[in-house]
Every structure is written in C-alpha cells, then in structure tokens.
Image: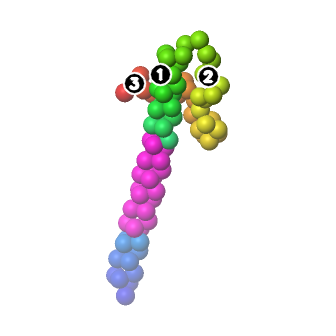
Amino acid sequence: MRLQDQQLARQLMRLRGDINKLKIEHTCRLHRRMLNDATYELEERDELADLFCDSPLASSFSLSTPLKLIGVTKMNINSRSEHN
C-alpha cells in the first residue's frame, strides 16, 4: 500500500509539472501572437506612412489598449525585431 501511495504521488507530481509546462507554453504562444500582431500593425502603419507622407497617421495606427496595459510599446517591439 505504501509503495502504491509513493508511486501515485510521483505520478501526480509529474502530471502537475506537465500541466504547468503546458500552461507556460500556451501563454508564450499567446504573447508571441500578440507581439506579431502588433509588429504587423506597425509595419502596416509604416507602409501607409510612406504612401501618404503628408498626413499624420500616428494617432489612427497606435498600439491597442490591451498591449499598452501589459507594457508593450512601439520601442519594445522595434528593439526586439532588430535583434532577430
């Protein structure tokens, strides 16, 4: 009985570790997707700015509020893309 308890405890610990790893991987994928979306938005804004260099586009193509709330800024994204 004691051996079975120990085996079950080890199995539960492995499962807990696996679940935590999956949660982290999922969160990383979501953050990567959010950063990719923000990068795409900035690239699109830059392309439009090249086409219409006389009109100010910064206010209409700024980062979305959810990205700002988690601390993502244009500078973060631009510096990250320069390193890749």
Mark 1 closeness class: few <14, some 14–19, many ≥20 residues within 10 Å? few
Choose between 67 and 46: the one closer to the eye: 46
User: What's the residue type where badge 3 is placed?
Assistant: His
Q: Residue at x 38, y 66 (%)?
A: 14
Q: First in sequence, mark 1 or 2: give its number.
A: 1
Write down the residue under mark 3. Answer: 83
- Up/down of 41 relative to 10, above or below: above
Q: Residue furthest bottom?
A: 1
What secondary structure is found at the residue carrying circle 1? Answer: helix
Q: Residue at x 35, y 77 (%)?
A: 7
Where residue 83 appears, as percent x and y from the top left, is 39, 24
Split into 4 quadrants, where in the image is the N terminus? bottom left
User: What's the residue type where badge 2 is placed?
Assistant: Ala
User: What's the residue type where badge 1 is placed?
Assistant: Glu
Choose between 4 and 24: the one closer to the eye: 24
Q: Residue at x 64, y 38 (%)?
A: 65
Write down the residue under mark 1. Answer: 47
Q: Main secondary structure of the magenta part?
A: helix
- Up/down of 36 relative to 4, above or below: above
Where residue 30 appears, as percent x and y from the top left, is 47, 47
Query: Do we see residue 83 in this rendering?
Result: yes
Q: Quadrant of residue 71?
A: top right
Answer yes or no: do the residues labelled 1 and 3 have beta carbons within 8 Å?
Answer: no
What secondary structure is found at the residue carrying circle 3? Answer: helix
Q: First in sequence, mark 1 or 3: give its number.
A: 1
Q: Name the mark nearer the viewer: 2 or 3.
A: 2
Q: Residue at x 61, y 37 (%)?
A: 64
Cα–Cα span, label 2 and label 3: 24 Å
Mark 2 closeness class: few <14, some 14–19, many ≥20 residues within 10 Å? few
Q: Residue furthest top?
A: 54
Cα–Cα span, label 1 and label 2: 12 Å
Write down the residue under mark 2. Answer: 58
